Amino acid sequence: MQGAPQRPSSLGRSWLAALFATLGVVLFGAAVATAMAVEPAGEASPQLTSPFMATISGPPARPLTLDELDRYAALAGWPNEPGWWPEMRRIVLCETASLDPRAFNPDDPNGGSFGLAQLNGRYHFDRAGEDFRRWSDPVVNLRTALWLRTVRGRFGGEGGWANCAALLGIH
């Protein structure tokens, strides 16, 4: 039949289908990559305050070393002088012996105690101007603890590391 259109061979159809499938995957991938690169309206990227915040999953599920703890305390602004970081370092070691930035004690008041300094609930984070969602960032946690120590003018007492401060003779 001379006037009838010819059907493409099965090889031609397979090649054509593969081409369209590949183009679809490439275009879909580009669209997804573009969508992920755009920030939602009204939400700014968080400022990085410590190396932990540079990772998607947050702080590693491992204890800090004492050197790392000291570096994070310095980044948080703790003065390394009597009455400040040396005492808080001892309290952190008492409160969170594992030095796990993700330490959480659900049995403490106000929703539990959070992070290296075992801060109760979100109250102190809010008052210190810190984002409670970042409680496990060592710098944010220690900066909030510094705010608390500064406002109180002491360690221990009601609502502030009372057990460890008494145990260690820190006031």
Image: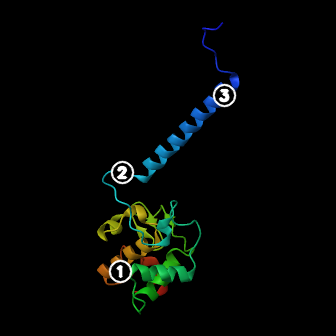
Q: Name the residue tied to disc 1.
A: 149
Q: Name the residue tied to disc 3.
A: 14
- Which residue occupies the extreme bottom position in the image? 82
**In which quadrant of the rendered image does the N terminus lie?**
top right
Which label was assigned to residue 40?
A: 2
Q: Earlier in the sequence, mark 1 or mark 3?
A: 3
Residue 79 at x, y = what percent? 39, 88
Q: Are marks 1 and 2 in contact (CB under 8 Å)?
A: no
Q: Quadrant of residue 42?
A: bottom left
In this picture, residue 11 sits left or right of residue 131: right
Residue nearer the viewer, 56 or 19:
19
Report if residue 9 is visible in the image: yes
In this picture, residue 128 sits left or right of residue 78: left
Q: Give the label, 1 or 3, closer to the camera.
A: 3
Location of residue 77 with respect to 5 vertically, above or below: below
Q: Amino acid at mark 1?
A: Arg
Alpha carbon of mark 2 to alpha carbon of mark 3: how far?
41 Å
Q: Amino acid at mark 2?
A: Pro
Q: Residue at x 51, y 79 (%)?
A: 69
